[in-house]
């Protein structure tokens, strides 16, 4: 069977016509498994190198970690991972290209190619993926939140990056900072500090 | 309804359109909904019942199948956060208002936008 480098998984867990053994995936006791597979469906197409694609389809050894990353088992490609949230984020950014002037009904400009490229560069650089949402002023809102309600957020635009850290959800103790250069580096450093790396 | 000032007790409603990118994170409003160079566009309650307000949104946006939901926040809460809600009536909508960062600055900063997102509630 010819396997293409892209995989689309439908709601019945068929990938390119080959059934992924859903029951075995469910028995991994990862409550996020079904959700993760649905996330794959939402993303539609996953681009993988041919060898990984072949093994992914034939193997049912997969587990999902708490960050929604599918870790392929040793019988497939040992240790190979693809980050679902990164794929979702890049898809969200890609869709911004489709927005025209006044997309928000309040005169919002279309996103420029420079803005899109900056957002993609940031998301690709991040080992730990954030939640993201575009704003009406053509910037990208980026947010991390941990189990202790600490929040790290950025408002990323071409001209500057605004950073806010809210310790334990207490806005009165929030720390703010503005970067006017080295955006990717500064965001990476902030995220590493946030997670204690 | 005072056309020159939004009373503290008034509720401000912000429409979320289907055609707009999702400004929610984990099902909750995010700061992205409150960041806009031209001010955050809302409708003041102007003494209307919520049901009437939502019906007006549906009539205005759903004819294009573009009404998703709304979020709401009390004007006093906006002022407590340090933002500046002001009337901005138009010929088409006398209830139109905006939330600005302050009296002098239109674009709401990130910290205030995060607080607005935390304080607002989704209209069911």
Image: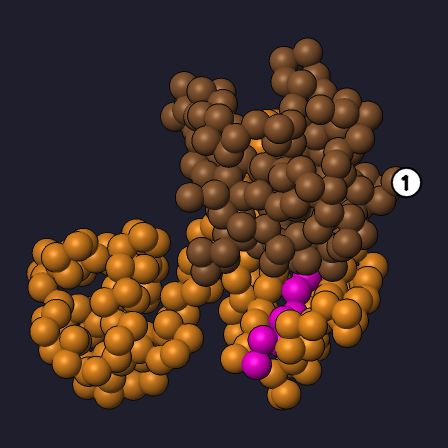
Chain colours: A orange, B brown
- Foreground of the two, A100 or B61: B61
Confirm whether the magenta stretch covers residue A59.
no
Rendered image quadrant of residue A82: bottom left
Q: Which residue is mark 1?
A: B104
Q: The residue marked by circle 1 belongs to what chain? A: B
- Foreground of the two, A152 or B101: B101
Answer whether residue A95 is visible to the viewer in this image. no
Q: Is residue B68 above or below residue A170?
A: above
Answer whether residue B22 is visible to the viewer in this image. yes
Q: Residue at x 37, y 74 (%)?
A: A69
Position in image of residue A80 (x %, y %): 34, 79
Rendered image quadrant of residue A172: bottom right
Numbered range of the magenta stretch: A148-157
Q: Residue furthest right?
A: B104
Q: Residue furthest top?
A: B91
Q: Is residue B110 above or below residue A167?
A: above
Q: Residue at x 88, y 40 (%)?
A: B103
- Quadrant for the C terminus of chain A in the image: bottom right
Q: Is residue A195 above or below residue A141?
A: below
Position in image of residue A181 (x %, y %): 81, 62
Q: Residue at x 66, y 52 (%)?
A: B116
- Quadrant for the N terminus of chain A in the image: bottom left
Position in image of residue B56 (x %, y %): 49, 23
Q: Residue at x 65, y 31 (%)?
A: B44
Q: Is residue A79 above or below residue B54?
A: below
Q: Is residue B82 left or right of residue A47?
A: right
């Amino acid at each position: 069977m010819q396997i293409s480098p892209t995989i689309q998984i439908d709601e019945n867990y068929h990938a390119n016509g080959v059934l992924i053994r859903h029951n075995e995936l469910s028995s991994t006791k990862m409550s996020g498994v079904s959700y993760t597979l649905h996330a794959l469906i939402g993303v539609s197409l996953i681009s993988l190198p041919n060898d990984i694609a072949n093994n992914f389809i034939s193997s049912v050894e997969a587990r999902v970690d708490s960050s929604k990353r599918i870790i392929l088992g040793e019988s497939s490609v040992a240790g190979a991972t693809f980050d679902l949230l990164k794929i979702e984020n890049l898809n969200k950014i890609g869709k911004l290209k489709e927005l025209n002037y006044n997309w928000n009904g309040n005169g919002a400009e279309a996103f420029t190619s420079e803005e899109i490229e900056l957002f993609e560069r940031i998301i690709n650089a991040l080992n730990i993926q954030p939640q993201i949402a575009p704003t009406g002023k053509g910037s990208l809102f980026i947010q991390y939140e941990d189990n202790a309600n600490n929040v790290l957020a950025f408002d990323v635009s071409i001209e500057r990056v605004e950073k806010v850290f809210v310790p334990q959800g207490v806005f009165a103790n929030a720390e703010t900072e503005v970067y006017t250069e080295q955006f990717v580096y500064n965001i990476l450093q902030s995220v590493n500090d946030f997670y204690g790396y | 309804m005072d056309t020159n000032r939004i009373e503290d007790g008034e509720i401000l409603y912000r429409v979320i359109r289907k055609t707009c990118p999702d400004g929610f994170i984990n099902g909750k409003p995010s700061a992205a909904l409150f960041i806009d160079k031209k001010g955050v566009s809302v409708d003041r309650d102007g003494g209307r019942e919520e049901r009437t307000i939502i019906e007006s949104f549906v009539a205005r946006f759903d004819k294009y199948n573009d009404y998703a939901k709304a979020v709401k926040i009390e004007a006093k809460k906006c002022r407590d956060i340090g933002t500046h809600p002001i009337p901005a009536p138009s010929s088409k909508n006398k209830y139109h208002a905006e939330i600005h960062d302050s009296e002098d600055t239109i674009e709401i900063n990130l910290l205030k936008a995060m607080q607005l997102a935390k304080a607002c509630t989704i209209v069911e």
